[in-house]
Image (cartoon, coloured by chain):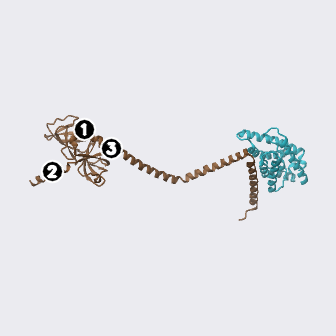
Amino acid sequence: MKLPPLIYNSIGKFLLFAALEAVCLLLIVRNSTVQSSRVMEGVRTVQSFFWEKSAAVKKYTALGSTNRDLIAENARLLEQNAKLRDFIIRTQGEDRLAEISDQMRGNIGDSALTNFSFTLAKVVKNTLNTTHNYLILDKGENDGITEDLGVITPSGVVGIIRGTGPRFSYVMSLLNLKQSISAKLGRGSSLGTLKWEGGSICKAYLTEVALNTPVEKGDTVFTSGNSSFFPSDIPIGKALSFTIEDGMYKRVEVELLQDFSNLDYVIVIKNGDKREIDSLSAINAAYMEKK
Amino acid sequence: MNWAKYIFGFVVILVLQLLASGFINLWPVLYIALIPLLVILLPPDTNTYLLLLCGFAIGLLTDVLADGIPGLNAACCTLLAASRNMITRPMRRYDIQTEEMDLSYGEFRPEKLFVLLLASYLVFFIPYVLIDGPMGKGILWLTFRIILNVAVNVVIAYLLVRLWIRRFF
């Protein structure tokens, strides 16, 4: 493309002017320290301006990858954090487990716990708003968990394991209409059956308590130890009031010690004598059937 | 145009400039600059390329012969040469229209000559002071120095042109 003479002429004049000024500037910079430093200062200022702008542009265009890196880093940190938290909780849990075990041995007596072993498990699911509530624990057959093991916390009874998978187990909560636990009032021998009847998750009822059993508000309800699920004398709740049922038994309203809405870790109790007890119970059942 | 007279006038102004640079030192911040006159008073119809080269050569010659910062006068004279036609074109057009003749700048009327010198010295001294001025003095000092140099040099140049130099151009 041929440029118009006027533009061609103007460009030529400008180029000549620029060339002459460049020569002058070169002379000045080469022959004068002060002017050289001033020119270099100006050049550096211009350079730094462009560096700053280009850095800003680079930074802006790299935001996508920076964001991706940050998300990846965040995910990695979250994973690490979860592992560390789990480690801390497990460590604390194990310490706590040992502490509870010692406490229980102190409260209940060594002889009652001789054949019981304890496994710490984390609650991964806990339902509260139905009449057939249940829990899922993160321990299963791989961890030696089997059906019909009791589940407790330091505050009381939680439920009984009714199903197991390789890694998880299903616990029928005490807050389930189908669940009942053998319990006693005080440390005596006034047995009864503890059962949740719906409604408040803080209350259950100890039924079939003998009429001659004295009931005071604040009396503690313990596990009876008459089943193979729980050792005896684990505190479950406090007596609030009672009524006479059919003129034959007392029905005690019990405030549960366990807060079911705040379950994180639980203890699975394994009774070493359970198999023998169950087999003997089976003999009894078979005998009754023959009769 | 009589080139012999012009060259003679050119030599005289250059010698005066060298004398002024070498011997007249009123104040370090004041620079008696006569060489802009050589650029201003080049023939009005001088080709721009030639004007640029002449401006550069005049400045460089002064830098070489005088004891200054090499390239400083050359840079300012080149800039003045580049802008000379822009400064003088409106003035020349007016005079051509009214008097119907292509005046040389030496024949300008006094007020127009004054404006021409003022604009030219401003173009010359602004870069001169900015490049030559000491660092860290601030904008007020630089402004003062520009005004001082322009004022003194415009008066000197005006008197020189009106009283003597116009005979050569």
Q: Residue at x 48, y 51 (%)?
A: A70
- Contact (Cβ within 8 Å) of mark 1 with mark 2: no
In terms of secondary structure, where does tag 2 sit?
A: helix
Give me the chain letter of mark 2: A
Disc 1 to disc 3, C-alpha distance: 19 Å
Question: Mark 1 and mark 3, same subunit?
Answer: yes
Q: Residue furthest left?
A: A291
* Residue type at numbered disc 2: Leu
In the image, is B74 to the left or to the right of A96?
right
Looking at the picture, how far across and down is residue A19, in whole percent? 75, 55
* Residue type at numbered disc 3: Gly
**Circle nearer the N terminus (2, 3):** 3
**Circle nearer the N terminus (1, 3):** 3
Disc 2 to disc 3, C-alpha distance: 35 Å
* Residue type at numbered disc 1: Gly
Q: Is residue B127 visible?
A: yes
Give me the chain letter of mark 1: A
Nearer-the-camera pick, B156 or A222: A222
In terms of secondary structure, where does tag 3 sit?
A: helix
In terms of secondary structure, where does tag 1 sit?
A: helix
Which of label 1 and label 2 is nearer to you?
1
- Contact (Cβ within 8 Å) of mark 2 with mark 3: no
Nearer-the-camera pick, A115 or B41: A115
**What residue would you read off at disc 3?**
A93
Nearer-the-camera pick, A37 or B109: A37
**What residue would you read off at disc 2?**
A280
For the N terminus of chain A, which image quadrant? bottom right
Looking at the picture, how far across and down is residue B24, in whole percent? 84, 40
Which of label 1 and label 3 is nearer to you?
1
Mark number displayed over residue A254? none
Q: Residue at x 35, y 44 (%)?
A: A91
